[in-house]
Image: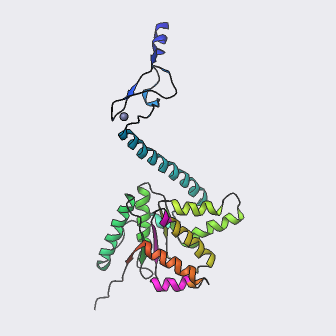
Amino acid sequence: MALESTRYNRVINRKLKKCGFCNKELTPKGLDYLYENISADSIEYERCDCKKSREYWIKKDGEEYLKKKNRYYLTILNGLYKEGYIRKNYQNKSFENYNTSQVNKMAVEIIEDYTKECIENSETNGMIITGISGIGKTHLVAAIANKLIENGKIVLIGRLTMLLDKIKETFVDNTKSENELIELYSNIDMIIIDDLGTERISKWALEKLYSIIENRNENRLPIIITTRFDKNGLSRRFREGQDEQLADAVISKLYQMCYGVTLVKEKELV
Ligand SMILES: [Zn+2]
């Protein structure tokens, strides 16, 4: 019995681990000696300073930072959108249950490829999906959102007013700040603004939209827009906000950083 417990607590002096790249012996951090009953996985070793090890840790630390950042943004999102930031009517939409007409086959393929690139983080350009009401733009962007979420991305999807209402709430509720929300919208993996231009857009809303677009462009993060307006039509809608310069700036930035895809109506058979 006594013997058993001494064996259990036997001290192993400076148990070393070898660097997986150069085989250099590494010492455990903060411990001069170890007990045998400490599991090897729980011990943190010094980092080797060889080139390969340094490269490994830069990558590893980067991934860890991203995970932490995502957890942080997800906590804010869950707090903000208590009713669920992916609305019910978006949830069941997928590429599989989208009824692709022959004329839009190519467009849908482009959108699916684009989604794959977003999943691999290799896409920094945004996308503007244009088409008349009822053509299925919302279904497609909901499918993109769901696909990205399945792959661990943080996505916000909704109309501009829905997104901006959360900012307006910060004026009443001082525990949230406007900057924090703009930062959130500027840094999450994807933001999808559905049906842009349909709702009246004030100068204030346009300013916020500009900040989000500009920041995402700087952060090399994409944005997706659906709209039933073409570039000129959208520009006219924005100019109704009484600041033509700002309206033009938003349009020019948006079209400069986005691919364009148009969904068309199948011609009726004669
Ligand atoms: Zn090494």
Q: Residue furthest bottom?
A: 270
Drawn side of residue 50 relative to residue 228, left or right: left
Horizontal side of residue 232 vs 94, given as left or right: right
Q: Residue 53's image quarter?
A: top left
Q: Report the front residue among 27 and 110.
A: 27
Q: Position of residue 7 (x, y in %)?
A: 45, 12
Q: Residue at x 28, y 88 (%)?
A: 269
Q: Indicate which quadrant contains ligand 1.
A: top left
- Point out residue 114 in the picture as x, y percentages from the top left corner: 36, 66
Residue 1, above or below 14: above
Q: How is the image coloured?
A: rainbow
Residue 14: percent from left, percent from top: 44, 21
Identity of the residue drawn at 33% across and 83% down: 266
Q: Is residue 243 magenta?
A: no
Q: Position of residue 198 (x, y in %)?
A: 53, 80
Q: Which residues are the magenta region?
A: 216-238
**217 is within the stretch colored magenta:** yes
Q: Residue at x 45, y 32 (%)?
A: 46
| Residue 96 appears anywhere in the view | no
Q: Is residue 168 above or below residue 59?
A: below
Q: Between 197 and 121, which is closer to the camera in this rendering?
A: 121
